[in-house]
Image: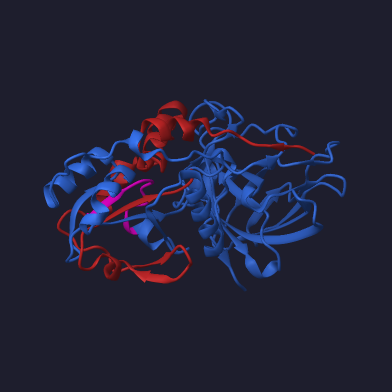
Amino acid sequence: METVERDYSDKGVSFYYVYKPLAHPEYNNYIAPITIEERLMHVEEAKRLLGSSVTWLADTMSNDFHEAMGRTPNSELVIDPDGVIVAARAWSNPEELRQDMVRLIGPVDHPTTIADLDLPTQPPAPTVAKGIVPRIEKPQGMLPIEIAAILDSSDIPFYAKIRAEGDSGILADGSGTMYLGFHLDPLYHVHWNNEAGPVTYRLNAPPGVTVTPASGTGPDVSAPADSDPREFLVNVTAENIDQPLRLDVFYFGCDDALTFCIPVNQSYEITLSRDESHDWSIRTDENGPILGAGPGVGPGGGRGAGGGGRRR
Amino acid sequence: MTTAASPAKEFIMLTRSASLTLILGALLQTSLVAAQGMPPQVTPPQVRFESAPQVGDLIPDLTIVDDQGNPASLREITRGHYTVMTLGCLT
């Protein structure tokens, strides 16, 4: 869109990127935001990465625009001055967009090309060393289930965020295998303080739901710090999925600049139903996406969860 | 401890060979979907889009936010001029 924006913004056309829920959480280590402030941190990160001159907007945390657009990952609309949609597509397409502009506004003498943009490229947000704690192998086909951070459970940001995924049994009737992954949000530049103790969690299930194991402790890591996820698989037997589970997590974190090291105790609600706002997660390493780590091919994969927080 | 930056080869490749719109999701989506396999329970985006507003419809009467968090009306933003809106995210 940037090339088209360069040619038509001075002809009265307004261009916007609208930030929406993550399509594939964990790709390049990015974690789904749980507050509007965090979503706006993502917008700033997108600005940094892309160097674009296009104006950014963001969906609210109720994801109304994303829902209205069919929860598509990269859709595009062209709207006329009366608010009528004159072009709509599931996938943004710069060539088609330029054709729209030619049709609606008129051609330009020298269309801007990608080479003309000369935009800077930036790497994703850096993290403290990864690859220290082995990743677990998830069952095939896991997809995200609904989680909500209990924002009042902590006065500090959710430096590490839970991503919960369920297998087909969980998604069907609440009984099956659930993945719990505690992933550090790279935009906070905080890492695990392994010298203080491992990550621990406790799940409190409502009547009619049994979770095994109901609590867990992450590995005892000899390295003083790392930013690898802490992951667990639990079995869930649910006769009643009307009420959410409560998850409490405890960990020690330090910021990468080592200005603080603190204990963190935060809580979430997990509802045993599919989170439709996010698609499957994509694991990446220093070489990029890990092929075969998707939800339908071998171990690993699944959709990310984490669409918002709830105040109590 | 060490800081390990992760060079975004995928982003760099896309930056130099495609528009930013693609960086925001499309080419990444199609290539990774092909590489990693969309699970059968996931409805393809093209099908999901069938429920979205189509040509001839009014833009939804919704509130979004600007990059400072200030609420903004979609209809107010788009009134009086042609507008292009592309939805996307970092992943």
> Going 77% across and 59% down the picture, which residue do you hit?
A264
> Going 41% across and 43% down the picture, which residue do you hit?
B24
* Viewer-proximal residue among B5 and B27: B5
> Going 86% across and 36% down the picture, which residue do you hit?
A222
Where residue A35 appears, x then y in whole percent? Answer: 55, 63
Q: Look at the picture and state if A31 lies above or below B33.
A: below
Is A256 inside the magenta-drawn segment? no
* Viewer-proximal residue among A220 and A176: A220
* Viewer-proximal residue among A200 and A87: A87
Q: Look at the picture and state if B17 lies above or below A5.
A: above
Where residue A192 appears, x then y in whole percent? Answer: 77, 47
Q: Look at the picture and state if A80 lies above or below A90.
A: below
> Going 55% across and 57% down the picture, which residue do you hit?
A41
Q: Which chain wears red?
A: B
Residue farthest toward the bottom in the current orientation of the protein: A312
Let me know if residue A91 appears in the view.
no
* Viewer-proximal residue among B17 and A62: B17
Q: The N terminus of chain B is located in which quarter?
A: top right
Say which quarter of the image contains residue A99.
Answer: top left
Magenta-drawn segment: A68-78
Where residue B33 appears, x then y in whole percent? Answer: 42, 32
| Tally of numbered tags | 0
Left or right of A109, for residue A230 = right
Left or right of A66, for residue A308 = right
Q: Look at the picture and state if A192 lies above or below A147.
A: above
Q: Which chain wears blue?
A: A
